[in-house]
């Protein structure tokens, strides 16, 4: 991660520290005092617990990495998706505004409909095409409406990290590596263009952003640079590790059953870049991750 500026210590209440991004924020933190309650201690669906924890921790900053981000499951459980991705974010933002704490919340490339073919800017109009994206847009509005001067929302895409993703049974990269032991052919969607992002790089960028006193509230895009399809991403995993799996492109038209996914959801990092914060290219990030996690598998 490239960044300009020097750090200043703050007290952070980190929600979702056991997930991919939260775990890497803890691991890459070098100077901040982080309090990280587990889900049993702080339930996002309990507004009273939210305010109590912000008061108790005396937090200067709240970082919320928790979300309901199993995309197909959101279609089946829309009420819970709204409670976690929207209502809870609104509660966090209101509590932060009342207690004069900053809030960093996260959102997704799925807030866009995927109709354009150039990277989406922070101020482009959202148009989600599935429940997950709808709840995330609603969460963005809830945060900015409740705490326009205190809340920053970071959109990102295609996360993978050392801690995996509990709700998805691991991350995309680790699943592909595991499959290589038992398959020689993999069919992978080729029609979606994304910007896959390492939570190692993202966490460093988030920490850099909160260290910038000139970083205003609002929406930011933080993703590894460049773009690829899921097919190209899977193929790169096997190429880097020298694993002999044929990856066959399949056009599923962005659908999982009746659920739609955006066909193009690349995000442009313009606001953070103006502050001197950028992430490396996605292929470089992937190579670093694989070399760290699977050193024995390299040719």
Image (spheres, grey):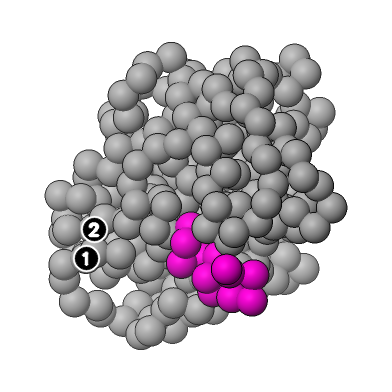
Q: Can residue 167 be seen in the rendering of this structure?
A: no
- In this rendering, position of residue 193 left or right of residue 180: left
Please tell me whether mark 2 sits on a helix, a strand or a loop.
loop
Q: Which quadrant: the N terminus?
A: bottom left
> Measuring 46% from the left and 67% from the top, which residue is drawn there?
288
On the image, which quarter does residue 185 sit in?
top right
* Rendering coords of residue 279 (x, y %): 32, 56
Please tell me whether mark 1 sits on a helix, a strand or a loop.
loop
- In this rendering, position of residue 37 left or right of residue 208: right
- Kindly report the secondary structure that dominates the magenta region of the rendered protein: helix
| Residue situated in front as seen by the camera: 230 or 214 | 230
- Say whether residue 165 is magenta: no
Q: Earlier in the sequence, mark 2 or mark 1?
A: 1
On the image, which quarter does residue 60 sit in?
bottom left
Q: In 3D space, how far apart are the residues under numbered discs 2 and 1 (Cα atoms)?
A: 4 Å
* Rendering coords of residue 246 (x, y %): 67, 40
- In this rendering, position of residue 138 left or right of residue 248: left
The dot on residue 207 is: none
Q: Look at the image and give the residue range highlighted in magenta.
A: 286-299
Q: Residues within 10 Å of mark 2 (few under 14, many from 20)?
A: many
Which residue is tagged 2?
A: 277
| Residue situated in front as seen by the camera: 244 or 69 | 244
Which residue is tagged 1?
A: 3
Q: Are marks 2 and 1 in contact (CB under 8 Å)?
A: yes
- Say whether residue 298 is magenta: yes
> Measuring 69% from the left and 57% from the top, which residue is drawn there?
177
Judged from this view, the residue extending furthest toward the right is 182
* Rendering coords of residue 299 (x, y %): 57, 68
> Measuring 55% from the left and 22% from the top, which residue is drawn there?
191
């Amino acid at each position: 991660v490239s960044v300009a500026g020097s750090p200043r210590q703050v007290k952070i209440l980190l929600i979702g520290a056991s997930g991919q991004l939260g775990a890497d924020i803890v691991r890459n933190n070098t100077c901040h005092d982080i309090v990280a309650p587990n889900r049993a201690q702080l339930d996002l669906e309990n507004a009273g617990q939210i305010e109590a924890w912000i008061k108790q921790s005396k937090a200067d900053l709240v970082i919320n990495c928790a979300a309901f981000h199993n995309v197909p499951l959101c279609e089946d459980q829309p009420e819970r998706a709204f409670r976690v991705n929207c209502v809870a974010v609104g509660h966090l933002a209101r509590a932060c505004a009342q207690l004069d704490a900053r809030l960093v919340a996260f959102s997704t490339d799925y807030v866009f409909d995927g109709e354009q073919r150039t990277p989406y800017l922070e101020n482009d109009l959202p148009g989600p095409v599935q429940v997950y994206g709808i709840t995330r847009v609603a969460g963005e509005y809830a945060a900015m409406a409740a705490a326009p001067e205190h809340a920053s929302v970071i959109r990102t895409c295609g996360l993978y990290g050392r801690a995996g993703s509990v709700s998805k049974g691991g991350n995309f990269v680790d699943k592909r590596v595991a499959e290589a032991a038992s398959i020689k052919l993999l069919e992978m969607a080729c029609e979606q263009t994304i910007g896959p992002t390492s939570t190692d790089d993202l966490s460093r960028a988030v920490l850099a952003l909160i260290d910038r006193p000139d970083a205003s509230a609002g929406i930011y895009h933080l993703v590894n640079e460049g773009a690829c399809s899921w097919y190209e991403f899977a193929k790169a995993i096997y190429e880097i590790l020298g694993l002999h799996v044929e990856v066959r492109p399949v056009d599923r038209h962005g659908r999982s059953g009746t659920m739609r996914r955006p066909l193009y959801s690349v995000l442009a990092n313009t606001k953070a870049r103006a502050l001197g914060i950028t992430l490396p290219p996605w292929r470089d990030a992937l190579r670093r991750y694989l070399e760290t996690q699977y050193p024995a598998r390299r040719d």
